[in-house]
Amino acid sequence: MSISSPRVRTAHQPTSQGRPSPAPRSRALAAAGLAAIGPATWGTTYVTTTELLPPDRPLLAAALRALPAGLILLALTRRLPSGDWWWKAGVLGLLNFGAFFPLLFFGAYHLPGGVASTVSAVMPLLVAGFGVGVLKVRPTRRTLAAGLVGVVGVALLVLRGSASIDLAGIVAMLTATTLMALAVVLSKRWGRPEGVSLLALTGWQLTAGGLVLAPIALGFEGLPDHFTGANLAGYAYLGIIGTAIAYALWFRGIERLPASSVSFLGLTNPVVATLAGLLLLGQTLTLWQVGGLVLVLASVFVGQGRRTARKHA
């Protein structure tokens, strides 16, 4: 068995006559629902960070999200990469965690949350663009239209009239979103090695990204004088629920759904972040925000529309 020859699984497999044979709709919806748990969980990151974690240590938060979770998954699965997967896991770990997390936190610290979320909402359009070059698939007009509706919906949902624009923050968020979109497409292209579980593959990437983040975090921020119980609970939640489990479900969705479909599920992130602020921080919703929420949910629904795996992203 060659571990360097990945088996790419998709939600649609062509028949011997060359026509697509889509999986039952219920299975596709179940896969989308599980995958959506990942970005929905990430939507609670802002509340967790502001309410439970020590202030002014974003790199430490990123490192403690990635490395411990990765090492735990490695210990549980007892499987290391082999062959090409040493560098593939490194590339995906850098894109998903090692580079993405610092850029994400930098953008979050330099931009209002609404601006940051609006920038990240372009991911479905970026995935569609990368899909043309990497997956050799062409996005449909429906995909592009749904992507634009999603951006407008997120803008209405999270932007405020007083939102300020910081060029460095915009560049950081756009770069982070681009890296994650590329990671989605590469994950779809490479699949996973035969006989390797999703937890093992997730552990490889988390460990690779965490090994990049840990020395940077210690060098630039260091450790706080002490950790409170709330700090430990916050780090545990982000590491176990918001990272290890959430990313395993996200990667499962990438494996079983078309790349563009799973990218639209990322729009649940600002929706959950807004609802978390509403329920936990006492924030309120305006009529414009309600309209934005409807548009975002419509974009996610349309983005899950049936499409053939061979022709569409």
Image (cartoon, helix red, strand yellow):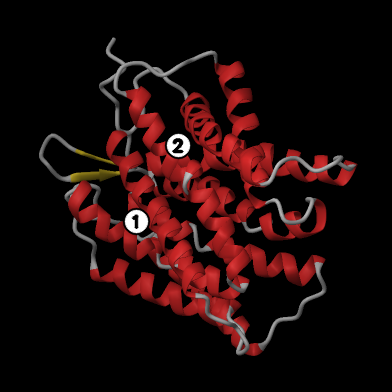
Q: Could you tell me residue 224's position as x and y percent?
A: 80, 43
Q: Could you tell me residue 119's position as x and y percent?
A: 46, 70
Q: Secondary structure at mark 2?
A: helix
Residue closer to the observer: 213 or 31 = 213
**Which mark is in front, 2 or 1?**
2
Q: Amino acid at mark 2?
A: Gly
Q: Is residue 208 above or below residue 225?
A: above
Q: Could you tell me residue 7's position as x and y percent?
A: 29, 27
C-beta proximity under 8 Å, tags 2 and 1 = no
Residue drawn 50% across the image and 63% down it? 267
Q: Which residue position is annotated with label 1?
A: 260
Residue closer to the observer: 30 or 219 = 219
Residue drawn 63% across the image and 46% down it? 220
Residue closer to the observer: 104 or 81 = 104
Q: Badge 2: how crowded within 10 Å, few (<14), some, or many (20+)? A: many
Name the image quarter holding residue 146: bottom left
Q: Residue furthest front?
A: 219
Q: Is residue 136 above or below residue 164?
A: above
Tell me the quadrant of the picture where the C terminus can be found. Answer: bottom left
Tell me the quadrant of the picture where the N terminus can be found. Answer: top left
Q: Which mark is residue 93?
A: 2
Name the image quarter holding residue 306: bottom left
Name the image quarter holding residue 268: bottom right
Residue 144 visible here:
yes
Classify residue 21 as left or right of residue 203. Answer: left
Residue 36 visible here:
no
